[in-house]
Image (cartoon, rainbow, N blue to C red):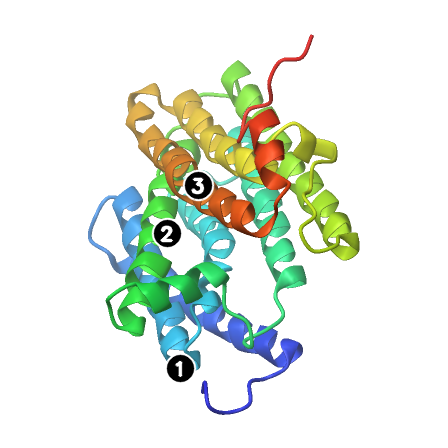
């Protein structure tokens, strides 16, 4: 497909919608058929859904067909896990978890859809990996582009099992904290995205975004993303404290951003924006400094 005309943006979105319809169907089938405990069946189903995006990447030679997977598949997992609870009606905790997950998913998916130009574009990180890694392009798109992020998301979704499927213990203080944190996290991402969108429409080459929430943190969108995954873990603790270990997912995602995404983006910004070094020196990567 790389040598033939690509569909326009509308056609590209229709193509990707079909890919994700297949991905969801594959995931749900594995959820139902896997002979393991529900949380491991969920993990298996999430990995199975990658088959659809990988097939599309082979067809289009574009790893960015996977970009929406991060936000599309967790609410699907949440829906299925809710069916495993045995409750005839949704509990207050289940409603709260779904409110957080679906708000986050809608925000992130909409942000992707608004910014994606179509199959004519592939994320610069994927392009760099395909160019620089001593591996076939298909293997790069499969392993670091798709399977690695899928592993982080699957781990991050582990708290959804105790939060949605285990016995209800009532809606407590920790649930309220988790709900507030999850809504705040996604609201922070929403504000950061809108501020960046306005800036990007007006910026000149080399300009650095240091306004609004970006004046407090170099990566407020990543901060919100990290806090979202920790909010899911708090819901799990509220539902079943013995499932504390599911926090490994939120911790892994924290490390992904701190050790991977943030250094990569900061390096690119230093190379492309002369003023970025001064901004970097005065602005924390994630947590804002307390100001007197």
Residue 218 visible, this orientation: no
Please name the residue shown 24% across and 68% down the image: 135
The picture places residue 278, in percent across and down from the top left corner, at 61, 33
Q: Which residue matches tag 2?
A: 149
Q: Earlier in the sequence, mark 3 or mark 1?
A: 1
Tell me where residue 259 appears, x and y as whole percent: 37, 37
Q: Which residue is mark 1?
A: 59
Q: CA distance from mark 2 to mark 1?
A: 21 Å
Say which residue label 3 marks. 263
Residue contact at pointers 3 and 1, CB within 8 angstroms: no
Considering the image in quadrants, where does the C terminus appear? top right
Q: Is residue 103 left or right of residue 200?
A: left
Is 268 positioned to the left or the right of 279 in the image? left
Residue situated furthest front in the rendering: 274
Give the residue at the far bottom of this rendering. 4
Q: Nearer the viewer, residue 56 or 273?
A: 273
Residue at image coords 44%, 21%: 238
74 is higher (above) or lower (below) than 97:
below
Query: Which dot, 3 or 2, sits closer to the camera?
Result: 3
């Amino acid at each position: 497909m790389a040598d033939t005309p690509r569909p326009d943006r509308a056609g590209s979105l229709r193509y990707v919608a079909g890919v994700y319809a297949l991905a969801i169907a594959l995931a749900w089938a594995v959820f139902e058929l896997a002979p393991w405990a529900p949380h491991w069946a969920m993990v298996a189903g999430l990995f199975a859904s990658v088959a659809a995006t990988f097939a599309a990447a082979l067809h289009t030679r574009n790893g960015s067909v996977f970009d929406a997977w991060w936000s599309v598949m967790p609410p699907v997992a949440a829906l299925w896990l809710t069916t495993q609870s045995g409750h005839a009606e949704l509990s207050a905790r289940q409603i709260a978890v779904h409110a957080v997950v679906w708000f986050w998913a809608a925000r992130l998916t909409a942000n992707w859809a608004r910014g994606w130009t179509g199959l004519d574009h592939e994320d610069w990180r994927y392009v760099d990996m395909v160019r620089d890694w001593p591996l076939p392009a298909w293997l790069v798109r499969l392993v670091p582009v798709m399977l690695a992020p899928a592993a982080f998301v699957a781990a991050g979704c582990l708290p959804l099992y105790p939060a949605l499927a285990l016995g209800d213990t009532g809606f407590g203080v920790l649930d309220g904290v988790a709900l507030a944190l999850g809504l705040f996290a996604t609201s922070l991402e929403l504000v950061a995205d809108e501020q960046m969108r306005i800036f990007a429409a007006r910026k000149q080459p080399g300009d650095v975004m240091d306004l609004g929430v970006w004046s407090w943190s170099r990566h407020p969108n990543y901060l919100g993303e990290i806090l979202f995954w920790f909010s899911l873990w708090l819901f799990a603790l509220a539902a079943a404290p013995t499932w504390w270990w599911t926090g490994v997912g939120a911790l892994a995602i924290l490390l992904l951003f701190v050790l991977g995404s943030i250094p990569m983006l900061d390096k690119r910004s230093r190379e492309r924006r002369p003023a970025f070094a001064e901004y970097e020196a005065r602005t924390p990567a994630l947590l804002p400094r307390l100001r007197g």
